[in-house]
Image: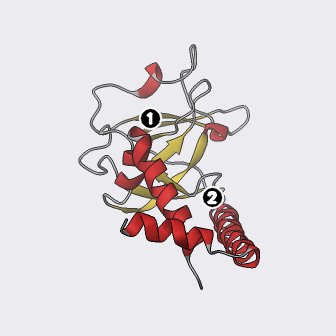
Amino acid sequence: MGWIGETVDSVKSLQIRQVLTQAVSLGMIVTSALIIWKALMCATGSESPVVVVLSGSMEPGFRRGDILFLHMSKEPIRAGEIVVFNVDGREIPIVHRVIKVHEREDTGEVDVLTKGDNNYGDDRLLYAQGQLWLQRHHIMGRAVGFLPYVGWVTIIMTEKPIIKYILIGALGLLVITSKD
């Protein structure tokens, strides 16, 4: 039967104690990943310290599949900075450059207008209906670094879910059949 037969025999020969040990190990890995993510959130001040560029709107600076590292500080946002923001009514955050900054005289709060480097016009058509500027609560963070192309793994698994399920199944099988 080959590899599949050996795997089935391996799963059948597992004892309850081995299965529990593997389950606890898997739980520790997942918990560690969550702790690292939360620590990054605290260290960067951003609700999402790492994002993947999903479109070509920021080319040539950032390409589809690049991973951006975000940081959110109390410093005012300035024109020219690249920010990641959420718009009311949209699930997916947008990565674009700040092109205008408007300071309100009455409160001192700063509103910003954004645009993708590869787009013709500003982002007012992307904002919620009637919204002309982004406020600070819309902005998730400023881009402070990037890794080119590494985000393609996320894009492929999102666009082709069968690959994600095969990968998760293979990793699960590996964890279950591991004798260590």
Residue 179: give x, y in percent of width and height.
58, 82
Q: Amino acid at mark 1?
A: Thr
Name the residue nearer the viewer: 34 or 131. Answer: 34
- In this rendering, the answer to whether 21 lies above or below 148 is below
How far separated are the C-alphas under marks 2 and 1?
18 Å
Quadrant where the C terminus sits is: bottom right
How many numbered marks appear? 2
Name the residue nearer the viewer: 165 or 41. Answer: 165
Is residue 120 in sight in this rendering? yes
Q: Amino acid at mark 2?
A: Ser
Q: Choose top left, top right, bottom left or bottom right for residue 66.
A: bottom left
Residue 110: give x, y in percent of width and height.
61, 39
**Which residue is under mark 1?**
114
Name the outermost residue toward the front. Answer: 1
- In this rendering, the answer to whether 73 lies above or below 63 is below
Q: Are marks 2 and 1 in contact (CB under 8 Å)?
A: no
**Which residue is under mark 2?**
73
Residue 138: give x, y in percent of width and height.
62, 37
